[in-house]
Image: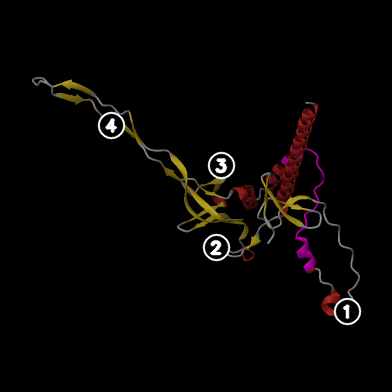
Amino acid sequence: MFKFKERRAAEAARRAAVAEQNAAAAAAQHRALLVQKLDEAKNFTGVDISQVPQCPLHAHAGERVFLDAIGAQLIEPRRGPGHYSGFSQGVSVHVPGTKSMRYRIGANRGTFVQGEEVPTPIDKGTFVITDQRAVFIGEKDTREWLWSKLLGFTHATDAPWTAIAVSNRQKTSGVLYDRATEDQVRFMLDLAAARSTGDTASLVEQIQAELTALGPGSPPAAAPALPAATRASAAVTATEQTGSPSPAREPAPPLPPQGWFPDPTHRHEMRYWNGTSWTEHVADRGTEAIDALQ
């Protein structure tokens, strides 16, 4: 009995330690993601469309792309089936002068009530966010939301989609995106609109407030930009290229310690760096998965 209690206590302690490690890892991921957002809110101004391969958007002069999301869906309100309200069968009365004939009076179908409008996916395609607008380019249709006409965003709480209200369109439409890219799409919408209106200071303050609310933490190390194998293949010395001795160079900066960093491939929120190279371990919204580097 004593050994059984010991085993149960040891197992409980192990589970508590794992839970604490998972919570710490999730907090570190969230902090690193906020740090990345803060940097982008301060410095990222989009890229030229020539740097976005196979982007279907016909860009305006000087237009810069913030995000190109493939596999998005256009959401528009569609009215559901209606119904009659107040239906009545009336009253059945006997017809005078007959033995069993009866006549129904007062019957009515009631008042027809239209069905509620429900956000419905109606097309599939590519969602592009720029510093001038957001554009859905689908298989059947195209929608454009100009930032100069923007009234506001509504990010759904129960699904990965955003409604975009603009003053030049009577009905509000929006875009459904992948759950794994939900946070990135919503942030880029906020950032692009803020860049357009010149109000990035408010977005920076919001992110800074979130970081402050997390409390003190270890200063985040700078994430390495490339996998170690890529970095090694690019490090060709002058001797190898020309056959002549290379000039003395400054020692390379030390590599960051192991930990979770924003995914350099941009396929996920975070990717694990083991101290020398990127690994296949990734995480989105605190959920870990495996995605090998190509």
Asked if residue 203 lies left or right of residue 70, the reply is: right
**Which residue in the protein does label 3 denote?**
156
Q: At label 4, which amino acid type do we have?
A: Arg
Are circles 2 and 1 on residues that touch, CB within 8 Å?
Answer: no
Q: Secondary structure at mark 4?
A: loop
Q: Which residue position holds label 1?
A: 244
Q: Report crowding for label 1: few under 14, some 14 to 19, many 20 or more residues within 10 A (C-alpha).
A: few
CA gap, disc 3 and disc 1: 62 Å
Q: CA distance from mark 3 to mark 4?
A: 37 Å
* Residues rendered magenta in the picture: 208-233
Q: Give the percent coordinates (x, y) of residue 47.
A: 66, 61
Mark 1: which amino acid?
A: Ser
Point out which mark residue 284 bears: none
Determine crowd level at label 4: few under 14, some 14-19, many 20+ residues with C-alpha closer than 10 A: few
Identified at 88% across, 74% down, the residue is: 246
Residue at 86 percent of width and 79 percent of height: 243
**Residue at which label 2 appears:** 56
- Residue at 59% x, 64% y is 61
User: x%, y% of residue 179?
Assistant: 59, 47
Give the class, few, some or many, for how many residues have Cα within 10 Å of label 2's Cα (few <14, many ≥20): some
> Which residue corresponds to mark 4?
109
Instruction: Give the percent coordinates (x, y) of residue 88.
Output: 28, 27
